Amino acid sequence: MLDRKFIRQNPDRVRQAVADKRESADVDAFLALDGRHLGILQEVEELKAERNRASEAINAMKREGRDASEAIAEAQRLAARIKELDAERQALELRLHEAQLGIPNLPHESVPAGGEEDAVFVRDWGEVVADPGWEIRPHWEIGEELGLLDLPRGSRVAGSGFPLFVGQGARLVRALVNLMLDLHAAAGFVELVPPLMVNSDAATGTGQLPKSAEQMYHVELDDLWLIPTAEVPVTNIYAGEILDGARLPLYYQAYTPCFRREAGAHGKDTRGLLRVHQFDKVELVKFVHPEASYDELESLLAEAEKVLQALALPYRVMTLATGDLSFAAAKCYDLEIWSGGVKRWLEISSVSNFEDFQARRANIRFRPARGEKPRFVHTLNGSGVALARLVAALLENGQTPTGKVRLPAALAPYMGGREFLER
């Protein structure tokens, strides 16, 4: 979240950020609450000073043998008023905190203005073969024909959007996960196996709550949330802590299943594996010095690209515009892979810098040096990468005229040396 003092001193910048991100936060309502909160604090301080003076006067009267009843009554009135204001302040603090949580992060100055159509092309890699000389079939057809996917039975078990991988399809998922974990471990990312459920504090810390509650699966009896991404548990491992600045940067990776309702997405990109409620993902998370966070963003992007290059999948990098940024992100790159079957670019990874937005919400700080005042870390994360669409791209881009699917050479050690997927 944004610092209250920053919002107070830069209301126009914050209003502009809300508009640019196409959010609905009421900055003026926050400022009104904040003004009343500050007014109460000031009034309480003045009343406490007055009460202290009254107490000194009462003590003096008692020492001198004078009647102090009126002064005592005034002191009691002051104490009652202070108690009344304290109760109002506590109630106001809850409303103020809620309003503060509803204000999005500011886009970085390098982020282009606009919506989805205004994303800026950064670079691409690999060759897109739009017409190989035969018809490229969509992944849901070739996957079913080769016995890799059974989407109808997955739907029978849990409903639409919960895929079932079978045989070599299931092995392909496992192979991809192991390949990614090995690649990122070689770059210094420490592997974690985090909880698949988090409490409300953790989901609030990374910005999923309260903004995106309708997109998450909630276990009401236990007040726990199925994770939409490993970003949530991994970022929160240091919630409430002060880290030794000498340890930064810290790099972590985690493979987890992820769960998203995708509310409002019905009818859009719902075929096959393009938009699902459960998917596997390797997530990368960084805790870094504020001064280094944008260099760290570029290296994190390169780390995600490394996966697609190893799999020889053509992709492009796009800088998202303000209106397409997530609530918590200051800047985000999307990695999009070419899908030969649907002939479209598909988002496969988002790589984001949150600056100190998440760290303030989760209270994650570091001490630059002994005796120095703690500062908030900068947090970053990115998918390294999400599997559902990755599998789709591999099945479509690897098709051959005979119907078999050629596997990238990098997967051979993880697939028992297998070169093709075939019936």
Image: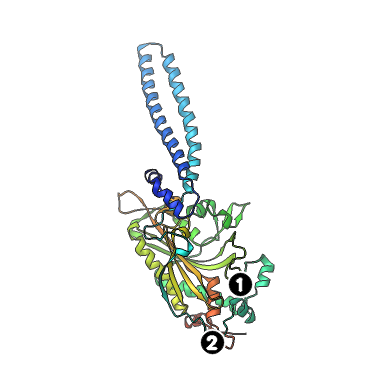
Q: Which image quadrant: the C terminus?
A: bottom right
Q: Amino acid at mark 2?
A: Gly
Residue lying at the far bottom in this picture: please name it: 402
Residue lying at the far right in this picture: please name it: 156
Secondary structure found at label 1: loop
Colour mode of the rendering: rainbow
Q: Which residue is mark 1?
A: 272
Q: Can residue 382 be seen?
A: no
Question: Where residue 246 sits: x, y (%)?
Answer: 33, 59
Whether 87 is drawn above or below 138: the answer is above
State the image quarter where residue 227 is shown: bottom right
Q: Amino acid at mark 1?
A: Gly
Q: Is residue 169 left or right of residue 74?
A: right
Secondary structure found at label 2: loop
Question: Where residue 266 sits: x, y (%)?
Answer: 62, 63
Question: Where residue 204 sits: x, y (%)?
Answer: 50, 52
Q: Nearer the viewer, residue 72 or 394?
A: 394
Q: Can residue 57 be seen?
A: yes
Mark 1 or mark 2, earlier in chain: 2
> Exactly how many numbered labels are in the figure?
2
Q: Residue at x 44, y 72 (%)?
A: 316
Question: Where residue 164 sits: x, y (%)?
Answer: 63, 72
Badge 1 vs badge 2, beta-carbon distance below 8 Å:
no
Q: Nearer the viewer, residue 25 or 223?
A: 25
Label 2 crowd (10 A; few <14 / some 14-19 / many >=20) = few
Nearer mark to the viewer, of 1 and 2? 2
Instruction: Give me the C-alpha separation between circle 1 and circle 2.
Output: 24 Å
Q: Which residue is mark 2?
A: 133
